[in-house]
Image (cartoon, rainbow, N blue to C red):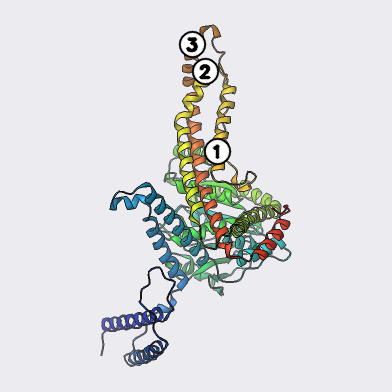
């Protein structure tokens, strides 16, 4: 009689034997000739492959008989999704691609300029190709359909499928999945209190909460829907389960790493009068090691109308919150910032934190923000209920009125981006290009972005002093200095946009605004004082307006850095999309460009 430990060891050893032989046989039997680094000298002959396959079948028969005779359960390796495994492997390979850059190779010896440029281009090309492979793996396999009567949505779905534009697929799918309800996305870092706040807001203990990352899957809570639990899987399957199984499917403990491969979980809330026809979505917290969580949270944003960004009152503001806030705005949704767990911090500190977050995030995003402190603890439910009734409910009503117009604007903006990608593909075909990815535009973009980041940093460091000196020499008042500063900032912003080679009327490229209106100053000294008056004026300006100008310039530079980073990524995706469509039939591509331009109300480009 075998012990349990012996059974486990035998099962693992037999599984390893079968898997190793199966993989070797598959690799050896495949035709060779196009590999850059071939593993085998020649492929197996057909006779050898057939004989080995027959032997492998006999081996499997022996394994089954032994397992049955010894009552050993076969390991459940068959639950592993190959797309999921490939996604993980590609993530590791992207890290390898990063190590092809000159900074990493310098440790192996001196690298000249030509070698550095070649390696940088190779790293950019391989990284972009691997990212494109992941884009294709991470989308749901089930066919997508536009809503009845949505001709533009149907056309976008058709073109994304025909030209394999994986980078647009998630956004097109999100628009196609719009339910007609007001979509509210709750986003934030891990353990920022999203699930707890939603439970308190809805006055129902639905979502699992804890001090470790608990939300593994995007969970949508539908007001005025029949109480039920529905599961959508990435392979297209759909299930209905008892509502009390919710925590098992959406928590990191019950479904670690989303091993069930769930695309989405929906929960019907029944009647909810204050939020009629609204959907509240609890997204996985960002900042954990789980890459699937970040993808799930960000992929949901294109369908949202309102983004509630939650920030822990006891934590510090990080780049992650800024990026999340920017992602909400970039998706076309309304942004509201909530300071959670405010019961853990004294009242004065909460007020200071709200003021700081409003100023810091507002400056980084180039917009004005207000921050509301809330808590889910029972002692502060009254304040939460008041916020819900006085602020959230009217906002949901307004968003419901504007939903159709917002949906149309998003579809048009996305259509223009896809059209630009198709134009790039047509240009490649017209110049004799092929379907391979050209790293030159990616490298040029990276070089231009690096230079522009340097220019923005120079502006942050040197512009305040130079502006004050020029204002003093010209005897400017505060209003004129404000106008001059805004003009310099505007030229820098236009230069930053030009570095990306984007169209000037691109809606997605709205630049941050330099917003500084200094208070009036006393009259300047008489011009008769000459150089002495100019020096006195410069000292006066530096004393009275210098700190505020320096702070505004730093905040604007931070916002411009963030804008540049975000749009460099978008431009990289656009360049890659144009290349991925490069294998299209020229006549079909020209016809599709004309169809999309007409649907967007644009004149076809020559």
Residue 125 has which mark? Answer: none
- Whether residue 2 sits left or right of residue 495 in the image: it is left
Vertical arrangement, residue 490 with respect to residue 222, above or below: above
Q: Position of residue 135 (x, y in %)?
A: 51, 63
Residue 472 has which mark? Answer: 2
- Cα–Cα span, label 3 and label 2: 10 Å
Q: Earlier in the sequence, mark 3 or mark 2?
A: 2
Q: In terms of secondary structure, where does tag 2 sit?
A: helix
- Cα–Cα span, label 1 and label 2: 27 Å
Q: Position of residue 579 (x, y in %)?
A: 55, 59
- Cα–Cα span, label 1 and label 3: 34 Å
Vertical arrangement, residue 470 with respect to residue 260, above or below: above
Q: Position of residue 13 (x, y in %)?
A: 30, 81
Q: Nearer the viewer, mark 1 or mark 3?
A: 1
Structural crowding at the residue carrying mark 1, measured as other residues with C-alpha within 10 Å and reported as few (<14), some (14–19) or many (≥20)? some
Q: Are marks 1 and 2 in contact (CB under 8 Å)?
A: no
Q: Earlier in the sequence, mark 1 or mark 3?
A: 1
- Whether residue 275 sits left or right of residue 465 in the image: it is right
Q: Earlier in the sequence, mark 1 or mark 2?
A: 2
Q: Nearer the viewer, mark 3 or mark 2?
A: 3
> For the point 66% across and 58% down, which residue is it?
276
Residue 495 has which mark? Answer: 1
Task: Name the residue at the top extreme.
Answer: 528
Q: Nearer the viewer, mark 1 or mark 2?
A: 1
Structural crowding at the residue carrying mark 2, measured as other residues with C-alpha within 10 Å and reported as few (<14), some (14–19) or many (≥20)? many
Task: Name the residue at the front extreme.
Answer: 432
> For the point 42% across and 56% down, which residue is it?
123
Residue bearing mark 3: 531
Using the rendered image of the protein, determine whether residue 179 is visible from the camera's viewpoint. Answer: no
């Amino acid at each position: 009689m075998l012990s349990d430990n012996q059974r486990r060891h035998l099962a693992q050893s037999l599984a390893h034997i079968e898997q190793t032989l199966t993989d070797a046989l598959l690799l050896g039997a495949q035709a060779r000739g196009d590999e850059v680094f071939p593993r085998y000298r020649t492929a197996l002959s057909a006779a050898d492959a057939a004989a080995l396959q027959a032997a492998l079948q006999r081996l499997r028969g022996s394994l089954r008989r032994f397992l049955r005779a010894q009552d050993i359960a076969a390991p459940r390796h068959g639950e592993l999704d190959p797309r999921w495994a490939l996604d993980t492997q590609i993530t590791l390979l992207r890290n390898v691609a990063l190590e092809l850059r000159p900074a990493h190779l310098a440790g192996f010896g001196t690298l000249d300029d030509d070698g550095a440029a070649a390696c940088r281009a190779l790293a950019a090309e391989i990284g972009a190709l691997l990212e494109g492979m992941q884009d294709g793996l991470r989308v749901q396999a089930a066919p997508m359909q536009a809503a009845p009567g949505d001709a533009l949505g149907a056309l976008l779905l058709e073109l994304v499928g025909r030209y394999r534009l994986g980078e647009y697929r998630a956004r097109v799918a999100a628009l196609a999945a719009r339910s007609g309800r007001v979509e509210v996305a709750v986003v934030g870092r891990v353990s920022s209190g999203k699930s707890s706040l939603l439970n308190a807001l809805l006055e129902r203990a639905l979502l699992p909460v804890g001090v470790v990352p608990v939300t593994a899957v995007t969970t949508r809570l539908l007001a005025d829907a029949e109480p039920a639990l529905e599961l959508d899987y990435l392979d297209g399957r759909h299930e209905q389960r008892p509502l009390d199984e919710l925590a098992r499917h959406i928590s990191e403990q019950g479904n670690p790493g989303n091993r069930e491969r769930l695309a989405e979980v929906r929960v019907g809330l029944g009647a909810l009068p204050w939020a009629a026809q609204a959907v509240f979505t609890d997204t996985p917290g960002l900042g954990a090691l789980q890459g699937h969580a970040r993808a799930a949270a960000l992929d949901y944003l294109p369908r949202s109308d309102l983004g509630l960004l939650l920030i822990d009152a006891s934590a510090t503001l990080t780049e992650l919150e800024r990026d999340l806030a920017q992602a909400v705005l970039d998706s076309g949704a309304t942004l509201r910032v909530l300071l959670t767990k405010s019961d853990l911090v004294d009242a004065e500190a909460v007020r200071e934190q709200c003021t700081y977050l409003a100023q810091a995030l507002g400056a980084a995003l180039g917009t004005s923000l207000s921050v509301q402190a809330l808590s889910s603890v029972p002692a502060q439910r009254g304040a939460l209920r008041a916020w819900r009734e006085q602020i959230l409910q009217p906002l949901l009503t307004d968003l419901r009125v504007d939903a159709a117009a917002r949906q149309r604007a998003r579809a048009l903006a996305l259509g223009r981006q896809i059209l630009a990608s198709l134009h790039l593909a047509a240009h490649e075909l017209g110049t004799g290009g092929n379907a391979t990815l050209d790293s030159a535009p990616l490298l040029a973009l990276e070089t231009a972005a690096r230079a522009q980041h340097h220019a923005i940093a120079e502006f942050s460091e040197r512009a305040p002093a130079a502006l004050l000196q020029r204002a003093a020499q010209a005897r400017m008042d505060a209003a004129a200095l404000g106008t001059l500063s805004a003009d310099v900032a505007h030229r820098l912003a236009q230069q930053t946009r030009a570095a990306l080679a984007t169209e000037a009327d691109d809606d997605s490229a709205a630049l941050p605004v330099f917003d500084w209106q200094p208070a009036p100053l006393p009259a300047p000294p008489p011009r008769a004082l000459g150089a002495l008056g100019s020096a006195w004026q410069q000292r006066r300006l530096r004393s009275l307006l210098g700190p505020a100008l320096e702070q505004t310039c730093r905040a604007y530079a931070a916002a411009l850095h963030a804008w540049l980073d975000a749009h460099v990524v978008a431009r990289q995706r656009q360049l890659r999309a144009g290349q991925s469509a490069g294998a299209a039939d020229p006549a079909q591509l020209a016809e599709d460009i004309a169809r999309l331009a007409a649907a967007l109300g644009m004149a076809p480009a020559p």
